[in-house]
Image: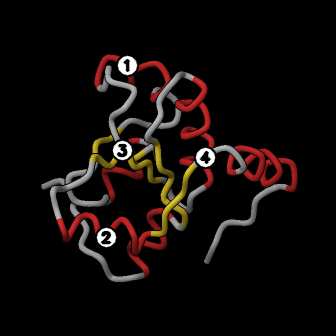
Amino acid sequence: MAKSHSPAFVQLVDDARSRIRECSVSDLHKRVVAGPTPIVIDVREESEFAAGHVPGAIPMSKGVIERDIEERFPDPNTELFLICGGGFRSALAADNLRKMGYLNIVSVDGGWRGWTGAGYPIEKPN
């Protein structure tokens, strides 16, 4: 079941979405299968990531991505796919990275719930 969000939060996300690129979980899966594997950054909390994630995804939660992105990916032209639980936090993070000068940020609409709902492969720590 999808989480119900407050109207102000939805308005904030919709505003961010007006300035960013998005793709569907199906689009991301096609990129993963076709190769080379795209860079996927999971902006969910550490505990969410630990419970399962897109194979090869890099954990960098919404709370730290803006702080750590330049060290990990200094080239603002690097294509980065951001995923969260449903596409809201990733949209906000994508907008912030856009403001920081990153030019190839894509938020995955539908997020983790869409990915698992489609039956795509997942990865869990051992």
- Of callouts 4 and 3, which one flags the residue occurring earlier in the amino acid sequence? 4
- Of callouts 3 and 2, which one flags the residue occurring earlier in the amino acid sequence? 2
Element under disc 3: strand
Mark-to-mark CA distance, 1 and 2: 26 Å
Q: Which of label 3 and label 2 is nearer to you?
A: 2
The residue sitting at 45% across, 43% down in the picture is 43
| Residue at numbered disc 3 | 41
Determine whether 28 is above or below 77 in the image: below
Mark-to-mark CA distance, 3 and 2: 14 Å
Quarter of the rendering occupied by the N terminus: bottom right
Mark-to-mark CA distance, 2 and 4: 20 Å
Element under disc 4: loop
Q: Which of label 1 and label 4 is nearer to you?
A: 4
Determine whether 86 is above or below 19 in the image: below
| Residue at numbered disc 4 | 20
- Of callouts 1 and 2, which one flags the residue occurring earlier in the amino acid sequence? 2
Task: Check residue 29 in the rendering and tell me which mark sits there, or answer none.
Answer: 2
Q: Which of label 4 and label 3 is nearer to you?
A: 4
Q: Quadrant of residue 116?
A: bottom left
| Residue at numbered disc 1 | 70
Quarter of the rendering occupied by the C terminus: bottom left
How packed mark 1 is, by other alpha carbons closer than 10 Å (few <14, some 14-19, many 20 or more), is some
Q: Which of label 1 and label 3 is nearer to you?
A: 1
